[in-house]
Image (tube, helix red, strand yellow):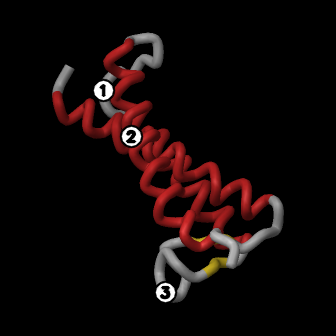
Amino acid sequence: MHPLQLLAWFFGGATLINAIPHLVSGLMGKPFQSPFANPPGEGLSSPTVNVAWGFFNLLLSWLLLCQVGAFDLRVPVDALAAGLGGVMIGLFCARHFGRFQQAG
């Protein structure tokens, strides 16, 4: 296993987890922050933009997890690399976007 494969799988896990809130918000017809909003990452993007961004994230995660090396979710090191990417982006998003959701 090459270290660059682990790095690709880390980012594959991150983009997979990042797809979830964009797809869910878009499919529910709700605006959500995206890199295309004004200001980027803070303003709200339309549901259509979020669905497109979510599917782009799914495509990127598929490329990174399934087309780089021989990723196997049953291999602990592979799963750990992708899982860490997912946890890291999840924690970042919780802190970053959580400040927009605070009441009052």
Location of residue 1 in the rendering, given as x and y in whole percent from the top left corner: 20, 19
Tag 2 near tag 3, CB within 8 Å: no
Q: Amino acid at mark 3?
A: Pro
| Residue 52 relative to residue 16: left or right | right
What residue is drawn where x is 45% and y is 49%?
91
Tag 1 near tag 2, CB within 8 Å: no
Location of residue 97 in the rendering, given as x and y in whole percent from the top left corner: 54, 66
What residue is drawn where x is 58% and y is 52%?
19
Residue situated furthest left in the rendering: 3
Mark 3 is surrounded, within 10 Å at the Cα level, by few (under 14), some (14 to 19) or many (20 or more) other residues, namely: few
Residue situated furthest right in the rendering: 28
| Quarter of the figure with residue 32 | bottom right
| Quarter of the figure with residue 81 | top left
Q: Secondary structure at mark 3?
A: loop
Q: CA distance from mark 2 to mark 3?
A: 25 Å
Above or below, 10 against 25 in this view is above
Q: Amino acid at mark 2?
A: Gly
Residue situated furthest front in the rendering: 104
Q: CA distance from mark 3 to mark 1?
A: 37 Å
Q: Which residue is mark 3?
A: 39
Q: Which residue is mark 2?
A: 85
Give whichever of discs 2 and 3 has the lower sequence position. 3
Q: Which residue is mark 1?
A: 69
Give whichever of discs 1 and 2 has the lower sequence position. 1
Q: CA distance from mark 1 to mark 2?
A: 17 Å
Q: Which mark is residue 17?
A: none
Give whichever of discs 3 and 1 has the lower sequence position. 3
Mark 2 is surrounded, within 10 Å at the Cα level, by few (under 14), some (14 to 19) or many (20 or more) other residues, namely: many
| Residue 76 relative to residue 27: left or right | left
Above or below, 13 against 49 in this view is above
Tag 3 near tag 1, CB within 8 Å: no
Between marks 1 and 2 in the image, the one whose residue lies nearer the viewer: 2
